[in-house]
Amino acid sequence: MNRPLPFDPIARAAQLWEDRIGPSETMAAVTGVMRVQQIIQSAVDNALKPHGLTFARYEALVLLTFARASSLPMRVMGERLQLHPTSVTNIVDRLEKDGLVNRVPHPTDRRTTLVEITDTGRARREQATKAVTAIDFGLNGLTGRQVEQLTELLTKVRKATGDFTE
């Protein structure tokens, strides 16, 4: 976007919706979430680009860093990242090509391939983490408490749609 608009287009759309269609609260909330997602995605992409990472590849490196043995089966990566197996394969292919992960045989299950983070992957993850945390992952304008409240609200929506069962 080149310059800020002199009005809030979502508020204006909500008023028009209210006048012509009916209650607009949900439409305005969803439209706001979608716009904020665009803003956050752009900020995070810009922070990760100098490190040769997309958010999906960054998430995979973080996940492997959190794993006890610094490795996980690809199937588990897909479950935890909530991605289709094909997407996980593509992510791992790119990370492996860049020397950030290795595929290794599982020590006890010949049918399973593990993905392990390399030292280069750890270093890249650390640099990328500094970049995204320096911009607060693109989530500007909120207090710490507001971020907590936002997380709580979004978690309720995720749980209601079956994202997890906790």
Image (spheres, grey):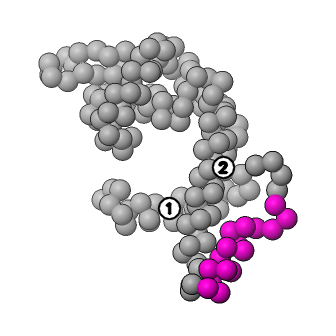
Q: Is residue 132 above or below residue 30?
A: above
Q: Is residue 84 above or below residue 22?
A: above
Q: Is residue 104 magenta?
A: no
Give the crowd class for mark 2: few <14, some 14-19, many >=20 residues within 10 Å: some
Asked whether residue 66 is in view, the answer is no
Q: Residue at x 63, y 28 (%)?
A: 49
Report the side of 106 relative to 10 (left or right): left
* Residue for point 37% across, 66% down: 160
Q: Which residue position is annotated with label 2? A: 39
Residue at the image point whose x is 82% and y is 56% from the top: 4
Q: Which mark is residue 64?
A: none
Q: Horizontal and vertical percent for residue 64?
A: 41, 28
Determine whether the residue tagged by mark 2 lies in a helix, strand or loop: helix
In the image, is residue 129 above or below residue 111? Answer: below
Q: Where in the figure is residue 32, as x and y percent of width and height?
A: 62, 64
12 in magenta: yes
Q: Secondary structure at mark 1?
A: helix
Marks 1 and 2, how far apart in space?
17 Å
Query: Is 162 placed left or right of 25 in the picture?
Result: left
Q: Earlier in the sequence, mark 1 or mark 2?
A: 2
Q: Nearer the viewer, residue 47 or 27?
A: 27
Q: Amino acid at mark 1?
A: Leu
Residue 149 falls in which quadrant of the image? Answer: bottom right
The residue where tag 1 is placed is: 154
Residue 128 occupies which quadrant of the picture?
top right
Whether 59 is drawn above or below 121: the answer is: below
Q: Main secondary structure of the magenta part?
A: helix
Q: Nearer the viewer, residue 112 or 148?
A: 112
The quadrant where residue 17 appears: bottom right
Q: Quadrant of the C terminus?
A: bottom left
Residue 158 place in picture, x, y as percent: 41, 60
Which residues are drawn in magenta? 5-20
